[in-house]
Image (cartoon, rainbow, N blue to C red):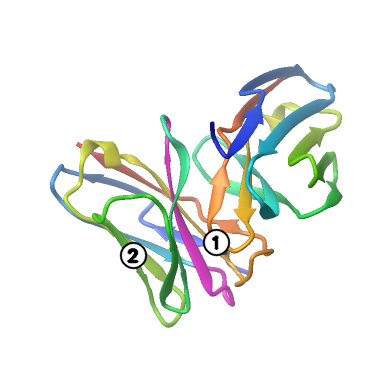
Amino acid sequence: KAGVTQTPRYLIKTRGQQVTLSCSPISGHRSVSWYQQTPGQGLQFLFEYFSETQRNKGNFPGRFSGRQFSNSRSEMNVSTLELGDSALYLCASSFPGSNTEAFFGQGTRLTVV
Amino acid sequence: KNEVEQSPQNLTAQEGEFITINCSYSVGISALHWLQQHPGGGIVSLFMLSSGKKKHGRLIATINIQEKHSSLHITASHPRDSAVYICAARGGTSYGKLTFGQGTILTVHP
């Protein structure tokens, strides 16, 4: 059974640009969550999608957005990139529900220069 | 004060030692996750607990709901156990939202 796939694995962007990251969940998983990991702030929740609807959103500016497609694949977008957006972006998929295990992808390492 | 606190932040052990990492949380939860992260970034889910105790190989995780505390134990530690261990709390109605501890950097020397 294939795991959670994130693409691309590495990305270098310039300040002011925008970026789109992709996450393909494990087959059958309909919930996808996104997280940002930085050395200073650790892991922080960005948002969660279920059945193409955002169910939860973390405390991030509106430059961070996402969406989920009918096949449960999800994308997140960051517009007007800032140096502080450099981070490891992780997604996790799970079956819906509050008591289900989360499976993480390998992450996309974004560097903003 | 963070909603999820881990201790210690750094832990160094000799191969074969018994290791304990602690996690305290201040929110109501539906589940507590223990995660492992190796250099390179990928995160592996070790345990998901809502009560009691779980064991997988040399790893044991316990949770005390009344005291809002969980522990991860590694018996007979090995250098390949060197990684960052992270606890994460899932709130009762917050579905996919996990709140993470700061992580414990474990180094096991041969």
Give the crowd class for mark 1: few <14, some 14-19, many >=20 residues within 10 Å: many
B68 relative to B44 in the view: left or right: right
Q: Which residue is found at the position 25% from the left and 56% from the top? A: A62
Can residue B39 be spotted in the picture? yes
Relative image position of residue A46 (x, y in whole percent):
41, 54
Chain letter of the residue carrying label 2: A
Task: Choose between A39 and A53: the one closer to the eye.
Answer: A53
Residues at marks 1 and 2, common chain?
no
Q: Which residue is found at the position 20% from the left and 55% from the top? A: A79
Relative image position of residue A32 (x, y in whole percent):
49, 66
Q: Are marks 1 and 2 in contact (CB under 8 Å)?
A: no
Residue that carries the numbered disc 1 in the rendered image: B96
Q: CA distance from mark 1 to mark 2?
A: 15 Å
Chain letter of the residue carrying label 1: B
B30 relative to A106 in the view: left or right: right
B54 relative to A40 in the view: left or right: right
Instruction: Indicate whether residue A32 is drawn in magenta.
Output: yes
Amino acid tagged 2? Gly
Task: Choose between B85 and A9: the one closer to the eye.
Answer: B85
Q: Which residues are magenta?
A: A25-39
Q: Which residue is found at the position 69% from the left and 64% from the top? A: A99
Task: Choose between A101 and B17: the one closer to the eye.
Answer: A101
Q: Measured along the vertical axis of the image, is residue A99 above or below residue A89?
A: below
Q: Secondary structure at mark 2?
A: strand
Q: Measured along the vertical axis of the image, is residue A70 above or below residue B50?
A: below
Relative image position of residue B75 (x, y in whole percent):
86, 31
Amino acid tagged 1? Gly
Instruction: Indicate whether residue B22 is drawn in magenta.
Output: no
Q: Measured along the vertical axis of the image, is residue A77 above or below residue B45?
A: below
Residue that carries the numbered disc 2 in the rendered image: A66
Can residue B110 be spotted in the picture? no
Which quadrant would residue B38 be assigned to in this image?
top right
